[in-house]
Image (cartoon, grey):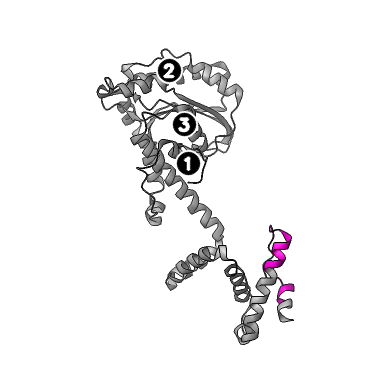
């Protein structure tokens, strides 16, 4: 009779989302177990307030389901390892947020850290065989946060803007021509690198999204990302093409709207160590505190970044949380290119 009163008061789990017959079985199973303990010693529950009583019933329910036991014990084990101060701190945190939100935040950060490590492995050891299409194309579309938190949601592709952006790009002199001038000196006679240069293509991504500026006025942020084939070393040629693209956009009547703002991002595996022009522009814009910034005229911003700068941006902006999480990850050196690419494209769980 007492157990049925507990059920009427909502002390037992509701099992919402479960199939009806399974939910009925599980509640009956939990009630039977609770009844056995209650009959053995009713005093166990006599002086308990509602909250601990409900927690005990829910915990009993979880422990009776074998496929959930290990996870529950792992969680309890870690909670019991906390000292009094840490328990109080966790309790305070749970008053302002939920454990679900805390877990979701940690999971997002860890997934991104794993993605950074896998992309770094690709760029270190598989760059000669990585294809922009289809390899990097889908990786970038699945991980636009790589370019900064402001790019987490770039929005859907808009045909008119993408078409205009791509057509304007193709008016740039020599934009689709590649040769030894796109390589570092040590790569000029490397047959594998030369083969990759001819076989790979550049990746072009253009998106337009509605946002607000610093004065809370609605504007459109137009983001154009061009990723050079991994064999290429970014140099003055590519910077000049980027600046020419910015000039073409600024003079295009359809893109001259005062509500349109542009961010042009040029990405390569590396910046040529012998290049003066890119490094000069980076130094001249260093006071803006934006990694990779080479131009900011108020309407158009241009960035030149190598993948390792992008990796470091993530590590620096999340350093406090990453240092405190101290996550441990598997060695990736034996993972194949296909496995790494599939993970990064979201084809299988990380």
Q: Are marks 2 and 1 in contact (CB under 8 Å)?
A: no
Give the residue at x 59% y 67%: 62
Q: Are marks 1 and 3 in contact (CB under 8 Å)?
A: no
Front residue of 44/336: it is 336
Front residue of 259/119: it is 119
To which quarter of the image does residue 180 belong? top left
Residue 227 location (% of width, % of height)? 43, 27
**On the image, numbered disc 3 is attached to which residue?**
135
Q: Is residue 348 visible?
A: yes
Front residue of 138/273: it is 138
- Tell me the number on the disc at residue 244: 2
Q: Is residue 14 magenta?
A: yes
Query: Where's the N terminus, which quadrant?
Result: bottom right
Nearest to N terminus: mark 3 or mark 2: 3
Q: Which residues are magenta?
A: 6-26
Residue 102 location (% of width, % of height)? 52, 57
Q: CA distance from mark 3 to mark 2?
A: 28 Å
Q: Is residue 316 magenta?
A: no
To which quarter of the image does residue 58 belong? bottom right
**On the image, numbered disc 1 is attached to which residue?**
343
Characterize the local packing of mark 3: few (<14), some (14-19) or many (20 or more) Cα atoms within 10 angstroms.
Answer: some
Nearest to N terminus: mark 1 or mark 3: 3
Give the residue at x 58% y 70%: 59
């Amino acid at each position: 009779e007492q157990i049925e009163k507990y059920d009427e008061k909502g002390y037992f789990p509701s099992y919402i989302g479960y199939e009806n017959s399974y939910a009925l079985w599980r509640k009956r199973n939990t009630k039977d177990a609770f009844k056995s303990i209650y009959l053995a010693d009713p005093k166990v529950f006599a002086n308990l307030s509602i909250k601990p009583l409900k927690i005990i019933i829910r915990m009993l329910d979880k422990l009776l389901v074998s496929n959930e036991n290990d996870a529950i014990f792992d969680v309890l084990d870690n909670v019991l390892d906390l000292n009094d101060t840490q328990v109080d701190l966790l309790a305070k945190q749970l008053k302002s947020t939920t454990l679900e939100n805390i877990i979701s935040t940690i999971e997002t950060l860890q997934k991104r850290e794993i993605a950074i490590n896998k992309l770094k492995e690709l760029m270190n050891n598989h760059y000669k065989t990585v294809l922009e299409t289809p390899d990097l194309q889908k990786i970038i579309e699945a991980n636009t946060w790589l370019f900064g938190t402001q790019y987490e949601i770039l929005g859907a592709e808009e045909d008119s803007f993408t078409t205009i952006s791509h057509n304007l790009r193709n008016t740039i002199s020599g934009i689709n021509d590649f040769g030894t001038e796109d390589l570092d000196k040590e790569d000029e006679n490397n047959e594998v690198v030369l083969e990759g240069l001819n076989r790979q293509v550049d990746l072009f991504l253009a998106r337009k999204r509605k946002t607000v500026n610093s004065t809370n006025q609605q504007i459109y942020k137009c983001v154009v990302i061009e990723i050079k084939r991994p064999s290429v070393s970014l140099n003055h040629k590519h910077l000049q093409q980027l600046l020419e693209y910015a000039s073409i956009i600024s003079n295009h009547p359809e893109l001259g709207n005062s509500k349109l703002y542009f961010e042009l991002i040029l990405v390569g595996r590396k910046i040529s160590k012998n290049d003066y022009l890119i490094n000069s522009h980076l130094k001249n814009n260093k006071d803006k505190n934006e990694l990779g910034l080479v131009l900011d005229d108020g309407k158009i911003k241009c960035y030149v970044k190598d993948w390792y700068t992008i990796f470091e941006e993530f590590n620096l902006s999340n350093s406090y949380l990453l240092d405190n999480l101290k996550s441990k990850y598997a060695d990736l050196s034996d993972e194949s290119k296909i496995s790494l690419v599939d993970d990064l494209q979201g084809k299988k769980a990380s």
